[in-house]
Image: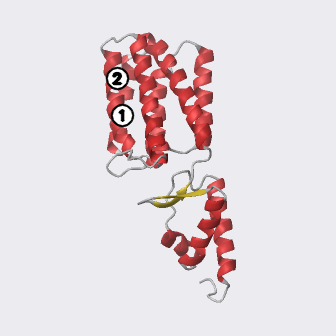
Amino acid sequence: MIDSLVPESSKAQRAYAWLAAKITDGGYPPGYRLVLGTIAAELEISVAPVREALRLLEAEGLVSYERNVGAQVAMTDPASYVEVMQTLGALEGVATGLAVPLITEADLDRARELNAALARTLDDFDPTEFTRLNLEFHETLFGRCPNRHLLDLVRRTRTRLAGLRDSTFSFVPGRARMSVAEHEKLINLITTGASAGKIESAVRKHREATLQAFLDHRNGRNSR
């Protein structure tokens, strides 16, 4: 056990350094809940120095406090996230529309499998796993885009988005269920022969809805 005679200030500094490392190296991704008791137990210290460490990290913008949630890892750059999401919605919408004539039955079957897997995560929600499956779902549809330059732009934008957050759904988990329903509608549009323009619009609205849920969350409005 850690020596109980170690000054609380030293314990807070150690907790601060440990938490900062976890956040900056991605061990604790944006949206990750920082539970005082759990962290204190892992560091074998009381909750008081952990609380102080979290206050220091909040002052630096690495931690935020949410009502009814508590402390969590903050979004890296909310303003950049908004811009990148807007860009991704436009690019991915066009790419998916162009891909439609080339999407195969096997692609659609895979998309259905992925959406079913997404639905199964909802009851015991894991935002990181949901995001991984979600990315694969969309890649399955827009990946047939014949415009290689556009496809490269979509993938570069998605990579940049990943650098800004691990999962938007960490912040707005209620959005996940709506996202699964929208995926189903998108698959139906493709299977029933909807126009490329209509499918492009559906993809853009899908991305915009996720962005709006995040903005509502930031502004204190109910996003569930």
Q: Quadrant of residue 40?
A: bottom right
Q: Which mark is residue 187?
A: 2
Is residue 103 rendered to the left or right of residue 46? left
- Is the C terminus in the top left, top right, bottom left or bottom right quadrant? top left
Q: Which mark is residue 115?
A: 1
In the image, residue 17 above or below residue 137: below
CA distance separating discs 2 and 1:
10 Å
The answer to the question of whether label 2 and label 1 lie on touching residues, with beta carbons closer than 8 A, is yes
Residue 168 position within the rendered picture, expressed as x and y whole percent measured from the top left: 49, 43
Residue 81 position within the rendered picture, expressed as x and y whole percent measured from the top left: 58, 38
In the image, residue 212 above or below residue 1: above
Choose between 153 and 220: the one closer to the eye.
220
Kind of residue at badge 2: Ile
Q: Is residue 144 visible?
A: no
Choose between 26 and 171: the one closer to the eye.
171
Choose between 71 and 186: the one closer to the eye.
71
